[in-house]
Image (cartoon, grey):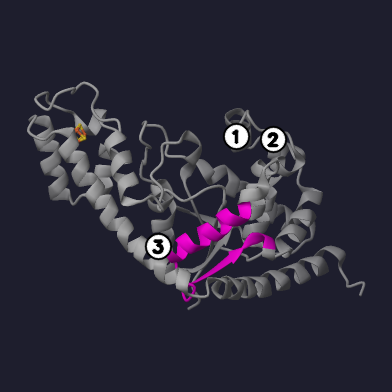
Amino acid sequence: MKKPRVLSGMRPTGPLHLGHLHGVLKNWLKLQDKYECFYFIADWHALTTEYESPEHIVDYSKELFLEWLSVGLSPEKSILFLQSAIKEHAELHLIFSMFIPVAWLERNPTYKEMLQDLQNKDLNTYGFLGYPVLQASDILIYKAQKVPVGVDQLPHLELTREIARRFNYLYKVDYFPEPEPILSEVPKIPGIDGRKMSKSYGNAIFLNDSPEEVKEKVMDYITDTLRPKKSDPGDPENRCVAFNLIRLYFLPEEKEEIVRDCKNAILGCVECKKRLSEKIISELTHIWEKRKEIEKEDWKEILYSGIEKAKEIAHQTIEEVNLIVFRKKII
Ligand code: SF4
């Protein structure tokens, strides 16, 4: 039986960090064994917010691709490609934009939130308002049945489903499937200062940091502020930011020991964070070693091959869509 098709993408707006690794990539790795996965570098989406300084998008795209391969995304299992290499995404976006009511886009909660959050950028643009339409094109051009999303992205996927319904209704066809969410539990990954890990907050541990940088950053993590001395009992689950990473990196019995020794004031934060940085470095070492191998390979060939596979499907979809919309071929 054919595996259901999954699509997901990532914007190349900076180096990858532990938030991406645990929040997105580990989930993608699991999915690639169960589904026919399409993963793409969303460079056009990056342009919606970075249009004033787009000079890093190409470098970040390359970096993203190399890191994907280094963490274990496999071109044998998944189709890995670059959005802007497949012009059919843009063509479908154009066709959809003819019949999407502006009100559907203006009511999008993420749109309002991002306008608020990114006040240093002028996002009152046609492209930024329409980015959920581009997302719908990314998904529907491959007729993906499943999309991995966090709860906060559900309104976006609902919009894609509405666009699929509207197309099918307007042109009296049953052409586009309504993609279903694969809801993934996203672990909480705060940065050094306790806010969400992000390049723009300067609080991230990047996958390409050196072991020394990892050690220093882990040492800077906020711990239980009501525990200035080792002899003060701590409350890791409720007051320690670093404990969110400890949760991810230690085995259950090791975690229990840390919680017990912290509460009993036996374990100090310096020793605890030293153990944590060793765990993180040990995981990253596998990625660093794989990265060295990948850099020796012809990674561009791997990307071209993914683009070719994606393009074949996208091209067929756009041919069919044009035939549905215009009823007949002009040439
Ligand atoms: S000992 Fe570990 S868990 Fe306890 S407060 Fe310090 S860093 Fe957090």
Compute the Cα span from label 3 to label 1: 29 Å
Residue at label 1?
A: 114
Write the residue at 62% across / 65% down.
Answer: 143
Region rendered in magenta: 57-84
Quadrant position of the C terminus in the picture:
bottom right
Q: Earlier in the sequence, mark 3 or mark 2?
A: 3
Q: Where's residue 156, x and y in %?
A: 59, 45
Quadrant of picture, ligand 1: top left
Q: Secondary structure at mark 2?
A: loop
Callout 2: 10 Å neighbours few (<14), some, many (20+)? Answer: some
Q: CA distance from mark 3 to mark 2?
A: 33 Å
Q: Amino acid at mark 2?
A: Leu
* Distance from Cα at disc 1 to Cα at disc 2: 9 Å
Asked if the residue at tag 2 contacts the one at tag 1, i.e. Cβ–Cβ closer than 8 Å, the answer is: yes
If you read the primary sequence from the N terminus, does the residue marked by circle 1 or circle 2 appear first?
1
- The part of the image, by quadrant, that contains residue 120 is top right
Q: Amino acid at mark 3?
A: Val
Residue 307 visible, this orientation: yes
Q: In this rendering, does residue 132 appear at all?
A: no
**Residue 71, numbered circle:** 3
Residue 236 lies in magenta, yes or no?
no
Disc 2: which residue:
123
Q: Is residue 72 magenta?
A: yes
Q: Label 1 amino acid?
A: Met
Please tell me the numbered disc located at residue 173.
Answer: none
